[in-house]
Amino acid sequence: MKSLRVVAIAFFLCAGGRAAAADAAPTLTVSISGAESQDGVIIVAIFDDEDNFLKQPIRFRTAAIETDGSAEAVFTSVPVGRYAVSAIHDADENGELTLGLLGIPREDYGFSNDARGRFGPPGFDSAAFAHEQPTTIEISLGGV
């Protein structure tokens, strides 16, 4: 019976240790500036590798636009790693970047490191940053 109690205590300590480790993952705050209107929302997405960049975010959320054109998205418990972030001013609230003729964006967008591509979006490496502790990054919208 004593060994069963020891196993139970060990189990709870290990489970608690894993929960504490997950809770210890730092917060990632994304501050966005440059929205030209309060129409719609800002969609902020986090990507963890080049293969999924701009295709499959690991996390995303929307943020309300303040009167000064700024917004903030806070992601809690983001594991330490290398990430890139995109932000879209989804003015028409269709859930995606609206494109016009020839695939040219009709809504403002931005990336971590304020990365820009020449004829299209930047690559993952241009927008990537290390997230090792509570991190705040800034993104300036533009593009239209």
Image: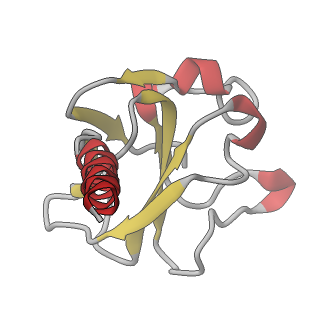
Looking at the picture, does residue 91 appear above or below residue 118? below
Looking at the picture, does residue 29 appear above or below residue 59? above
Q: Residue shown at 73%/43% (left/top)? A: 52
| Image position of 55 (left or right of 64) | right
Counting every numbered tag in the picture gives 0
Residue 130 or residue 34, whichever sits in front: 130
The answer to which image quadrant residue 5 occupies is bottom left
Q: Residue shown at 85%/52% (left/top)? A: 102
| Residue, far left | 67
- Colour option used: secondary structure
Residue 72 pos. (x, y %)? 23, 55
Residue 10 or residue 38, whichever sits in front: 10
Residue 97 pos. (x, y %)? 62, 62
Q: Is residue 14 among what the camera can see?
A: yes
The answer to which image quadrant residue 130 occupies is top left
Residue 94 pos. (x, y %)? 59, 80
Looking at the picture, does residue 23 appear above or below residue 116? below
Residue 62 or residue 78, whichever sits in front: 78
The answer to which image quadrant residue 126 occupies is top right
Q: Residue shown at 40%/45% (left/top)? A: 141
| Image position of 38 (left or right of 108) | left
Q: Is residue 76 among what the camera can see?
A: no
Residue 91 or residue 96, whichever sits in front: 96
| Residue, far front | 1
Say which quadrant the N terminus sits in. Answer: bottom left
